[in-house]
């Protein structure tokens, strides 16, 4: 049997959490149950809450950007700059590794492929403009992120990919635009600051 003094301290701690639970444990141990003084309302911690009252800090968050050949490389670059300024990491997710051909003279480099990553890795997913129809795995990633109340975004033709994935583009936490401009990037960062969009 454990040291009675240690058992008494543990039961006292349990009694401060839930008196009924502590009494049940004490009964099974064959000892007297302590009285305890549970706190009825300790309030909510904004730092720990999954239901914040305002958009919060985004530093350290990770955003995945789905691209295909024909992608708006300038938009991807502009988004990377805007997210980096907010302390957010951005990963380009492509159908294949290496370089992805852009709509202009430049392309983008893939950080991951759709087959070696998943939506659980990212705090938000974005579909880049200029991208063509997405493969089934990319579509599933978008649907999973939406069901998990994460932020989704798209610009230009990327919005069509959201629609094809049956994502409600007017739902809370879904950001769309014609191109990557300050307002689009700002709305994405604001949505990302909510972490989850439970009202969907």
Image: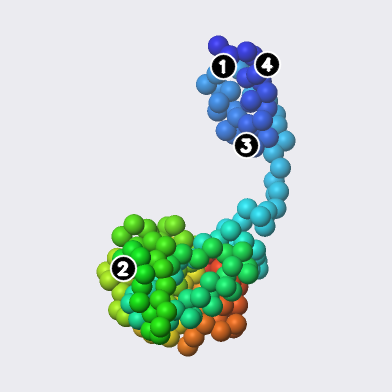
Q: Is residue 151 above or below residue 176?
A: above
Mark nearest the camera among 3 and 2 is 2
Q: Is residue 198 above or below residue 182?
A: above
- Say if residue 6 shows up in the picture: yes
Residue with the mark numbered 1? 30
Sequence-first disc among 1 and 4: 4
Q: Position of residue 75 (x, y in %)?
A: 49, 80
Sequence-first disc among 3 and 2: 3
Q: Please report the residue visible at 60 percent of the width from the left and 82 percent of the height from the top.
A: 182
**How many other residues sit within 10 Å of disc 2, few (<14), some (14-19) or many (≥20)?**
many
Mark nearest the camera among 2 and 1 is 2
Residue with the mark numbered 2? 95
Q: Position of residue 186 (x, y in %)?
A: 60, 77
Mark pair 1, 4: CA separation: 14 Å
Q: Quadrant of residue 6?
A: top right
Mark nearest the camera among 1 and 4 is 4
Tag on residue 18? Answer: 3
């Amino acid at each position: 049997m454990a040291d009675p003094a240690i058992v008494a301290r543990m039961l006292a701690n349990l009694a401060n959490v839930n008196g009924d639970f502590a009494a049940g444990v004490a009964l099974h141990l064959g000892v007297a149950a302590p009285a305890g003084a549970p706190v009825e309302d300790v309030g909510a911690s904004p730092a720990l809450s999954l239901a914040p009252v305002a958009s919060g800090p985004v530093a350290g968050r990770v955003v995945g950007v789905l691209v295909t050949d024909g992608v708006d490389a300038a938009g991807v670059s502009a988004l990377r700059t805007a997210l980096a300024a907010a302390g957010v990491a951005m990963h380009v997710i492509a159908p294949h590794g290496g370089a992805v051909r852009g709509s202009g003279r430049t392309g983008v480099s893939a950080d991951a492929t759709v087959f070696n990553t998943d939506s659980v890795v990212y705090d938000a997913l974005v579909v880049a403009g200029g991208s063509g129809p997405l493969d089934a795995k990319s579509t599933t990633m978008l649907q999973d992120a939406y069901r998990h109340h994460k932020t989704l975004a798209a610009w230009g033709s990327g919005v069509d990919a959201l629609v094809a994935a049956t994502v409600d583009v007017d739902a809370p936490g879904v950001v769309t635009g014609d191109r990557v401009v300050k307002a689009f990037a700002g709305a994405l960062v604001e949505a990302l600051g909510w972490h989850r969009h439970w009202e969907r």
